[in-house]
Amino acid sequence: MRLREFLIGTALMSFALVITQAGPPPLFHDEVSNDFVGEKKETTEPSSSVSIPPDPSPLIAKDKILRAAYYDTMSILSTTNLCSDFFGGPAASVEAFNQLIGRMRKEYLSGSIALRMTGQTTNMLNAATRKEYRLFEKVQVNAKGPFYRNSFPFSDTSFSHIGTFEPNTRQARVLIFLHELGHVVKGEDGEWLLPNDGNNDKVSNENTRRIQGICGDQIKGLDKSETKTLAP
C-alpha cells in the first residue's frame, strides 16, 4: 500500500542550509512562509533521554488522534534505544521530528495515502549534534486515509496493513510517522536514511518493513505505556 507520495523535482528543491540556534522550535501557522524554517540548538549534555519540546503546531492540541500519535512517537525518540539511535540519537531525532510535525496540515486526499510530503525542501543542520535533516514545504496527513480510518470512505474495502499493523491503530500511526522521519534524516553515509519511494508501492513497503525491523520492539511496547494526557 502506498503510505505516502513524493512529488520532488530537482529543479524545485531548495538547498539552503539552515544552522540551528538555541531555543524551542518555531510554531508554524498557515500564514507563515514554508520556504524557510528556523530551528533550535540542543545544548544539554548527552544523556539517556531528552526533554520533549512544546507542541509544534496548534493542530496537535486540536486533534486527539494526532496528539496521541505525536507523543507516542516522541516517547520512543526521546530515549536512547535502537530506534532513536537509527535516527541519530534522541536529541537529533526529537528535533527533526518536531520540525516535521510543525509543518503538518490535515487534508482530505484521495487514495490510500496516509501522509504525504511534497514541494521544495530546506536542508537543516543541528549545530550541537552535527546531524542533518531536511524539511518539505508541505506535509499533509490524510483525514480519509489509514492514519484515521480502517477502510476507504463509503466502501467496505479495507486499507492494507501498515507493516504488520492494522490501519487506524496506535502502532500503525507511529510506524507511519517513523517512516516519514526516515525520508527526512540524513545518515552517516550522506544519504537519506530511507530512499524516496514516490509512487512506488514496492519501495514504500520495503521502507516500512525496514523501519519496523528496527523500531518494532519500541512500537509494540507502546501497549505497555500511556501517552501524555490528551486535551479535552
Image (cartoon, rainbow, N blue to C red):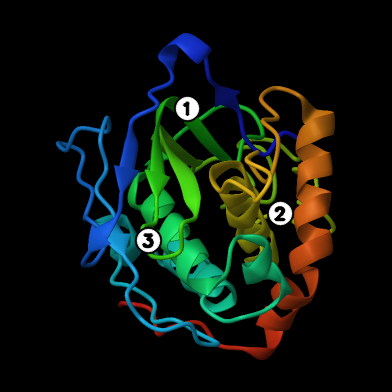
Q: What type is the residue that disc 2 sits on?
A: Pro
Position in image of residue 69 (x %, y %): 52, 66
Q: Secondary structure at mark 1?
A: strand
Please report the residue visible at 50 percent of the width from the left and 85 percent of the height from the top: 49
Q: What type is the residue that disc 1 sits on?
A: Thr
What is the crowding at mark 1: few (fewer than 14 residues within 10 Å), some, or many (at least 20)?
A: some
Most foreground residue, 170 or 84: 84
The picture quadrant where one finds residue 23 is bottom left
Which labelled disc corresponds to residue 95? none
- In the rendered image, the residue lying farthest to the top is 11
Q: What type is the residue that disc 3 sits on?
A: Asp
| Residue hosting label 3 | 63
Which labelled disc corresponds to residue 167? 2
Which quadrant of the figure contains the C terminus?
Answer: bottom left
Q: Secondary structure at mark 3?
A: loop
Position in image of residue 162 (x %, y %): 76, 51
46 above or below 115? Answer: below
Q: Is residue 56 visible?
A: no
Position in image of residue 175 (x %, y %): 67, 58
* Mark sitting earlier along the chain (1/3): 3
In the image, 51: left or right of 68? left
Position in image of residue 106 (x %, y %): 40, 43
Between marks 1 and 2 in the image, the one whose residue lies nearer the viewer: 1
Please report the residue visible at 39 percent of the width from the left and 44 percent of the height from the top: 124
In the image, 80: left or right of 58? right
60 above or below 146? Answer: below
